[in-house]
């Protein structure tokens, strides 16, 4: 990966347009409910301000229809929170494509929700050209939207005078590259969650790279079925059995291994009140639901991970939202946190589990970038990243 980074460009007096991911949750009163993404975006903005740039920050928020802006989709609360965190005023600029506005060197403004601009989603070069006229330097610090080619993430990167990655984008790509492009071996990947069908591309891509593939969660049941094991009433996709066999075959051809549970936690319902039982996989009954890895599987898994130098994790091992089915995922999170391996974890529910088990600061990189993270695991080149790379050629 080769792209310019913010620190490689002289920003003094320059008009700098930073595309952030400030798509934060708002509460019922319209206040910022979780400012993690705003805090994560501070280093790039501060770097530009300290260098005396004229800084414009924008982001999408929610899903506004293009051409109108409902007050509920306004970045106003985000601008206010950013102003508090930066301890500097952050005026919100409306109609920024049509009304002239001024930004002094060393000052910052927020440009209203970029997804309300007609042409944003369609990656319109015409829209991007108008945005390019507003700035000398374009900075993409929004890894979370890097899998979408939109005017502020893709076309603008090609048309602005200068284009570079912000520090958040650069560190995310560096961590993902270290785990996937040039991993220290042996490398293990844990892919869990609900269904094979939603993660088949990830399973196939990782089967090409790892020494050990651990399949967990509901999708492990489809692999167990493919291996001729009973799965009772568990979540399972018989139509994906052939796809699972292909993943198995890929691993085998490469001399890599598949890890499936040897014992499991079963119950007759996915509920807080269901009575859990631990069973060897071979003894799973016709009315059982497999809802977690069992203790013997977890001991084996923890041992296996100890030998690994790189660990990639996406997807819980069981129904971790319910305490009695969360032990496998908790032990996995702890094992990754304790491991000396370079470790990355990502995915919506995986990040929830990482936070629930309080291990975020002991995993080398926790990606909060949902879709972009998953597409990166699939081995896809993200359009926004490709645009930055093309500019650096
Ligand atoms: P992520 O968001 O991290 O990519 P997924 O969305 O693929 O993860 O999967 C998370 C969901 O999978 C959770 O809601 C969890 O309850 C569910 N799940 C895990 N194991 C099982 C299982 N054995 N049976 C049914 N659902 C499961
Ligand atoms: Mg999910």
Image (cartoon, grey):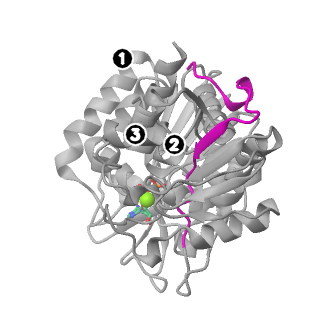
How many residues crowd around disc 1 within 10 Å: few (fewer than 14), some, or many (20 or more)? few
Q: Residue 128 carries which label?
A: 3
* Name of the residue lying farthest toward the left: 239
249 lies above or below 335:
above
User: Circle 2 sits on which residue?
Assistant: 190
Front: mark 1 or 3: 3
Provide the secondary structure element on which disc 3 rests: helix
Where residue 105 appears, x then y in whole percent?
A: 76, 44
Badge 2 element? strand
Disc 1 and disc 2: Cα gap in Å?
19 Å
Query: Which image quadrant for residue 15?
Result: top right
Q: Is residue 384 visible?
A: yes
Magenta residue span:
1-25
Q: Which numbered disc, 1 or 2, marks the residue that appears first in the sequence?
A: 2
Residue name at image x 45 percent, y 77 percent: 71
Q: Which of marks 1 and 2 is in front?
A: 2
Q: Which quadrant of the figure has residue 258?
A: top left
Q: Place residue 338 in its image quadrant.
A: top right
- Is 348 left, or right, of 196 in this rendering? right
**Position above or below: 152 against 205:** below
| 276 w.r.t. 138: above or below | below
Q: Is residue 100 left or right of residue 81?
A: left
For the residues labelled 3 and 2, the Cα–Cα distance comes to 39 Å
The mark found on residue 253 in the picture is: 1
């Amino acid at each position: 990966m080769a792209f310019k980074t913010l620190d490689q460009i002289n920003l003094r007096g320059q008009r700098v347009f930073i595309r952030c991911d400030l798509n934060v949750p708002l509460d019922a009163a319209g206040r910022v409910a979780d400012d993690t993404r705003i805090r994560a975006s501070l280093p790039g903005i501060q770097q530009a301000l300290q260098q005396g740039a004229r800084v414009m920050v924008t982001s999408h928020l929610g899903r506004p229809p293009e051409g109108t802006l409902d007050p509920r989709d306004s970045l106003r609360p985000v601008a206010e929170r950013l102003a508090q965190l930066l301890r500097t005023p952050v005026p919100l600029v409306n109609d920024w494509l049509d009304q002239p506005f001024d930004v002094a060197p060393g000052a910052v403004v927020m440009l209203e929700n970029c997804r309300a601009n007609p042409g944003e989603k369609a990656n319109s070069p015409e829209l991007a050209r108008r945005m390019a006229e507003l700035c000398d330097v374009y900075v993409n610090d929004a890894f979370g939207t890097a899998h979408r080619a939109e005017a502020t993430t893709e076309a603008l990167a090609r048309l602005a005078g200068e284009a570079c990655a912000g520090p958040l984008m650069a560190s995310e790509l560096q961590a993902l590259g270290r785990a996937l492009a040039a991993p220290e071996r042996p490398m293990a990947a844990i892919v869990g969650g609900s269904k094979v069908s939603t993660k088949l591309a990830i399973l196939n891509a990782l089967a090409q790279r790892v020494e050990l593939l651990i399949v967990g969660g509901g999708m492990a049941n489809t692999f167990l079925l493919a291996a001729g094991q009973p799965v009772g009433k568990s979540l399972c996709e018989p139509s994906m059995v052939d796809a699972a066999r292909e993943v198995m075959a890929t691993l085998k051809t490469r001399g890599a291994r598949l890890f499936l549970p040897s014992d499991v936690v079963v119950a007759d319902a996915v509920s807080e009140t269901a009575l859990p039982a631990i069973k060897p996989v071979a003894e799973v009954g016709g009315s059982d639901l497999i809802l977690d890895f069992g203790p013997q599987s977890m001991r084996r898994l923890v041992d296996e991970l100890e030998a690994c130098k790189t660990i990639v994790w996406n997807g819980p091992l069981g129904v971790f939202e319910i305490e009695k089915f969360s032990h496998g995922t908790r032990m996995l999170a702890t094992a990754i946190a304790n491991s000396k391996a370079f470790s990355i974890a990502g995915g919506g529910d995986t990040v929830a589990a990482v936070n629930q088990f309080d291990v975020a600061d002991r995993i080398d990189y926790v990606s909060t970038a949902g879709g972009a993270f998953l597409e990166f695991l699939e081995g896809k080149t993200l359009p926004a990243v490709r645009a930055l790379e093309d500019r650096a050629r």
